[in-house]
């Protein structure tokens, strides 16, 4: 729109001419207030009116209710019948958990045990032989003596005691279980054939009669029900073994006569005087070194050389190629100093 007075164009939403100030015609004034659009109201669906039931509908509903109640009654009767039948079935048998004491004679007699075990009574693998007993007794004496010696003596004995340690764990302590296991199928068959016992409870009966059945089998096979004498020796053996292992645990990893190097606990060394110098003149010192973890790249050693007054006047060193764990190597430290009297190891390391 243009101003009638000066012809200038009115700006949007302006009520006066920017050029001459003339008022904009009122019928064409643009509203500068933003419009707020109201959202569409949510539609509410009115509930359907509940129609009255006809007499026929009421009669049908009553029948449905009666059928439902009747169905529940039938189910309840069926459940009660099943419970009653299960109770009757349970009452037919004697049970191991009914609180009563039931002797083995309820299912077995001496003739049955004899028939079951006949010709199959070799249980030598369950019991130590006289030779086993003699050896374990001798080892027990040696272990007791070793326990009174040094820690290293205890450690040395443990290395030779593997036979005895293995033997102590060889023989079964639960003989009854082993006796029953040998004849389990035959024992179960006798229980399941007994009209007084529920076949489903055969394993429960084996557990219930474990000691009685094992005793009957042991008597028939003329074997012991336990390894009591052997177990007594084994207990003594294990007690002394524990003491030896405690002493042996105090023994350092390196051989006797060596000292751990302060800068590396995996290296141990000692002075060695049993070797000749590899030079025709001068003098030398030797040390033996053992490495717990090995020195794959090599081993380096260095000593300070001192005169008669203890003053450091020189140093010397030596190195050797890669070593494996537990290897013992010899390092030689050579000097040509006429005033050299003693040497002191100052450095030892894997490099």
Image (cartoon, rainbow, N blue to C red):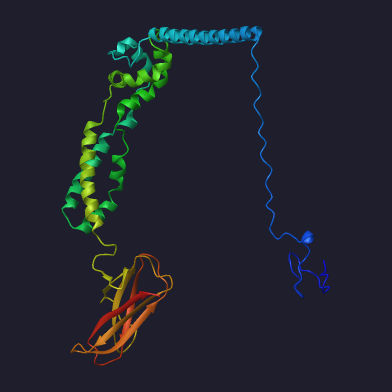
Which quadrant of the view contains residue 285?
A: bottom left
Residue drawn where x is 66% and y is 28% of the image: 46
What is the x, y in percent for residue 276? 30, 80
Q: Relative to the observer, which residue lies in front, 222 or 309?
A: 309
Measured along the vertical axis of the image, is residue 118 above or below residue 162? Answer: above
Residue drawn where x is 37% and y is 14% of the image: 115
Measured along the vertical axis of the image, is residue 88 above or below residue 270? Answer: above
Q: Relative to the observer, which residue lies in front, 65 or 59?
A: 59
Left or right: 8 as drawn, with respect to 159? right
Q: Residue furthest bottom?
A: 338
Measured along the vertical axis of the image, is residue 286 above or below residue 84? Answer: below
Residue drawn where x is 36% and y is 67% of the image: 327
What is the x, y in percent for residue 9? 81, 70
Left or right: 205 as drawn, with respect to 308? right
Which quadrant of the view contains residue 64?
A: top right
Measured along the vertical axis of the image, is residue 179 above or below residue 254? Answer: above
Residue drawn where x is 23% and y is 47% of the image: 241
What is the x, y in percent for residue 49? 65, 21
Image quadrant containing the C terminus: bottom left
Q: Relative to the observer, which residue lies in front, 232 or 99?
A: 99
Image quadrant containing the N terminus: bottom right
């Amino acid at each position: 729109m243009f101003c009638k007075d000066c012809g200038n164009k009115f700006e949007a939403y302006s009520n006066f001419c920017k050029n001459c100030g003339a008022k904009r015609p009122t019928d064409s004034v643009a509203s500068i207030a933003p419009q707020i659009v109201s959202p569409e109201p949510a539609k509410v669906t009115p509930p359907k009116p509940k129609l009255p039931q006809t007499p026929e509908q009421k009669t049908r509903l009553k029948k449905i209710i009666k059928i439902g109640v009747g169905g529940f009654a039938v189910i309840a009767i069926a459940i009660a019948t099943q419970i009653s039948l299960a109770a009757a079935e349970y009452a037919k048998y004697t049970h191991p958990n009914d609180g009563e004491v039931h002797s083995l004679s309820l299912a077995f007699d001496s003739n049955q045990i004899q028939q079951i075990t006949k010709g199959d009574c070799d249980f030598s693998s369950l019991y130590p032989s006289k030779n086993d007993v003699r050896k374990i007794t001798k080892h027990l004496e040696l272990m007791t003596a070793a326990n009174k010696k040094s820690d290293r003596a205890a450690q040395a004995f443990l290395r030779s005691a593997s036979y005895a340690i293995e033997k102590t764990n060889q023989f079964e302590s639960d003989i009854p279980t082993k006796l029953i296991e040998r004849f389990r199928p035959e024992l179960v068959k006798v229980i399941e054939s007994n009209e007084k016992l529920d076949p489903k409870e055969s394993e429960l009966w084996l557990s219930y009669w474990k000691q009685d059945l094992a005793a009957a089998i042991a008597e028939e096979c003329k074997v012991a029900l336990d390894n009591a004498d052997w177990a007594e020796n084994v207990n003594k053996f294990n007690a002394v073994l524990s003491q030896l292992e405690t002493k042996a645990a105090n023994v350092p990893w390196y051989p006797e006569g060596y000292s751990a190097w302060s800068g590396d606990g995996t290296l141990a060394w000692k002075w060695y005087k049993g070797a000749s110098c590899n030079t025709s003149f001068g003098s030398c010192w030797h040390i033996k070194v053992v490495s717990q973890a090995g020195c794959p790249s090599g081993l380096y050693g260095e000593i300070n050389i001192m005169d008669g007054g203890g003053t450091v006047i020189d140093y010397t060193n030596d190195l050797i190629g890669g070593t494996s764990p537990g290897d013992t190597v010899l390092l030689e430290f050579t000097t040509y100093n006429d005033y050299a009297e003693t040497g002191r190891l100052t450095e030892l390391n894997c490099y």
